[in-house]
Amino acid sequence: MTVETTIRPRGPYSLALSARRASDSTRRFGNGVLRCVLGSGEPTAACQLPDGTLVLRAETEAGIEGLRFVLGVEDDHSEFLERFRDDELLAGPIRHLKGLRPIRTATVTHALLKAVVGQLITSREARSIEWRLIRDTTKRVGRLQAPPLPEHLARFAPAELYRYRLPARKATALVRICRTFDPERLRRLPADAAAARLEQERGIGPYSVGVVWTQGLGRFDRGIVGDLGLLKVCSAIEGRWVETEDTARILARYEEWGGLACVYLMTGASRGLVPLKLSQPEVRRERIKTRRAA
């Protein structure tokens, strides 16, 4: 049985912009179609018609609801787009990328995995570790994998994760959290309670909270401070190598939209839409110089 529905997202929405870099082991975008496996193992798909409406397909009504969350179709970022359309850093990205919305993970546990694995390494390295770990842990669904749930990661001993090149500190934090707490519960908690529960965990800092916040919970009032990609972009903006607290300062101006500002800044910088003082090779040299001086 296939359930199909057509919806119009609230506010500007471009599936092509939003899903362009969303592909991982659990979802894939190609030929205008985003295919995504939910936590239940249910395959889903979405495409966008020329008039802007989305066609969603799943096996069940629950699958349609899960896909709606992944796509963020209920969010309306019009306030963000209007408020910062003349911002010195975001004016270009907003003008050219205003249909962009972050694609969310189907499970909070998947966002937690991304958050822990991605701490201070390149996105390419993080994707490789995440892909291999999920491939060996969850069930295959067509050409994709089901996203991880707590029980998939809790069964590992931390030492078993070393073969995925996950350092001891990260492996221990990931396994401990999945054994002692169900991350999926965070979607049912009030924002303050969810943040407090995350922040009490060893190995979960501002960067990891930001990733879980935006990708796992679909909230944008916390920026992904300390993200290596964001550090590089902010360094290019500032004209010097910056630290985590500098990214927090830059994002503070966007207040409750800090998480969305991160997405627009990093996507915009990759497309030459953000005014930068340094090129990426110059940023690398600044980083090396700062490390040597420390």
Image: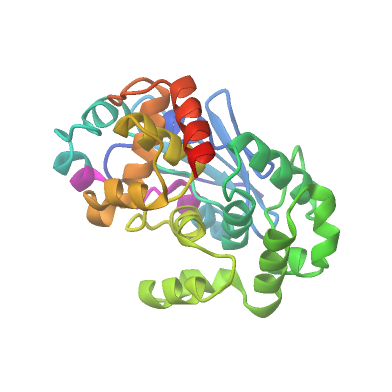
Specify whether 81 is left or right of 194.
left
| Residue 74 lies in the magenta stretch | yes
Residue 186 in the image: state x and y as whole percent.
50, 71
Q: How many tags in the picture?
A: 0
Image quarter for residue 96? top left
Q: Is residue 14 visible?
A: no
> Which residue occupies the foreground of this view, 181 or 208?
208
Residue 206 in the image: state x and y as whole percent.
45, 60
Q: Is residue 203 above or below residue 33?
A: below
Image quarter for residue 39? bottom right
From this viewpoint, which residue is outermost toward the front? Answer: 293
Residue 266 in the image: state x and y as whole percent.
40, 34
At 44% from the left and 54% from the top, the residue drawn is: 214
Q: Is residue 2 above or below residue 280?
A: below
| Residue 123 lies in the magenta stretch | no
Residue 274 in the image: state x and y as whole percent.
30, 26
At 21% from the left and 30% from the top, the residue drawn is: 91
Magenta-highlighted residues: 68-80
Q: Is residue 281 visible?
A: yes
Specify whether 113 is left or right of 137.
left
The colouring scheme, among rainbow, by chain, secondary structure or one colour, is rainbow
Q: Is residue 161 above or below residue 77?
A: below
Image quarter for residue 54? top left
At 71% from the left and 52% from the top, the residue drawn is: 146
